[in-house]
Amino acid sequence: MADLYSYSKLSTFTECPRNFYYTYICGERGGESVYTYLGTAAHDLAEAIDLGKISSDEAAERFVDAVDESDVLGFTWITEKSKVNYVECVSHFLRNHHPTDDPNIKIEDVFAVEIGNTVIWGFIDKWSMVGNTIYITDYKTSSKFSGADLEHKKLQLYIYAEALQRYYPKHDIKIQFNMMKYADTGKTLKARNELKIASEYNEGLVTFDYTDACREALHEWVNTTIGAINAKDRDDILDWKMGRNPDKDFFCANLCSHHGKCTNA
């Protein structure tokens, strides 16, 4: 019987086996951060706009309401400036995001794809078909990806592309992140709250082709990661090493759902 995984589950192990141990071996889901809470809200509002269920202005207003709710719930920010920048940028995105005119667009489309002895399942934020090309889009409220981080994050889109290419083997597939806090000025991605009022810009899309090399990288990552997980001792927490420094790393201090549990053991 094939193992059942999601991108999130596989990625958690790659980034930090100790986080994987707490979450999936012990079944401790941990808590949210302000970034996961508001990231989910922004994601849902963008998709509601795409489907024509809500206006752009109303979405921006609801996002501000969600920010107020996060304050009431006691979520904290790194600094007040980081809060202002985040809220201004995401609010600007929502005010300027518009519903699609594509009647065949798929939103939160469920998929499952078998790679080796592993079935990976999940939901694709948004995808559409234009002629012989499929466009897959994933919304992100994070800061821009760079270097090795970008290569790792692209694996999420590779999984989506692999699933759709099984159904549409003759189609070209373009995968893209929509970096919600940023706008494309034609030269670079720029934080939305740094745009000049009259400036011309497009949404902050970071686009790639899904190629044979991408497929090879995906299969290697999935098979290697599953092998590494299966080789771990599920009864020994020390066999699940920390992938980051809990005393210094931004993710550990602010985003990890198990913040505070880890030691330097």
Image (tube, rainbow, N blue to C red):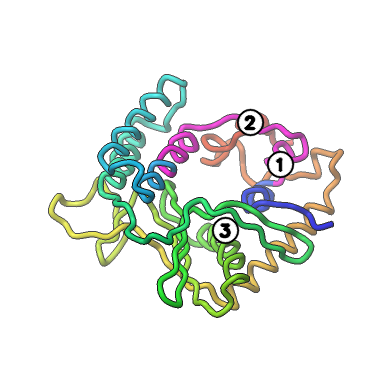
Q: Circle 1 sits on which residue?
A: 18
Q: Amino acid at mark 1?
A: Arg
Residue lying at 47% horizontally and 63% vertically, measured from the top left: 136
Magenta segment boundaries in residue numbering: 17-43
Vertical order, 183 against 38 (above or below) = below
Farthest left residue in view: 198
Question: How far across and how far down the image is residue 62, in percent?
Answer: 33, 33
Mark 2, secondary structure of its residue? loop
Q: Earlier in the sequence, mark 2 or mark 1?
A: 1
Cα separation, mark 3 vs mark 1, equals 21 Å
Image position of 187 (left or right of 235): left
Q: Answer with left or right where residue 176 lies relative to residue 211.
A: left
Q: Which numbered disc flags the more N-terminal residue, 2 or 3?
A: 2
Q: Quadrant of the C terminus?
A: top right
Name the main secondary structure of what is drawn in magenta.
helix
Write the residue at 46% across / 32% down: 34
Q: Which residue is mark 2?
A: 30
The answer to whether residue 137 is left or right of residue 222 is left
Q: Nearer the viewer, mark 3 or mark 1?
A: 3
Q: Residues within 10 Å of mark 2 (few under 14, many from 20)?
A: few
Vertical relation: 90 (above or below) 65:
below
**Disc marking residue 28:** none
The percent coordinates of residue 158 (x first, y second) are 57, 65
10 Å neighbourhood of mark 3: few (<14), some, or many (≥20)?
A: some
- Residue 63: percent from left, percent from top: 35, 35
Q: Quadrant of residue 90?
A: top left
Quarter assignment of residue 59: top left
Q: Earlier in the sequence, mark 3 or mark 1?
A: 1
Q: Which residue is mark 3?
A: 156
Which residue lies at the image location 47% right of the left edge and 70% below the top edge?
134
Magenta span has 121? no
Residue sitting at x 62%, y 49%: 8
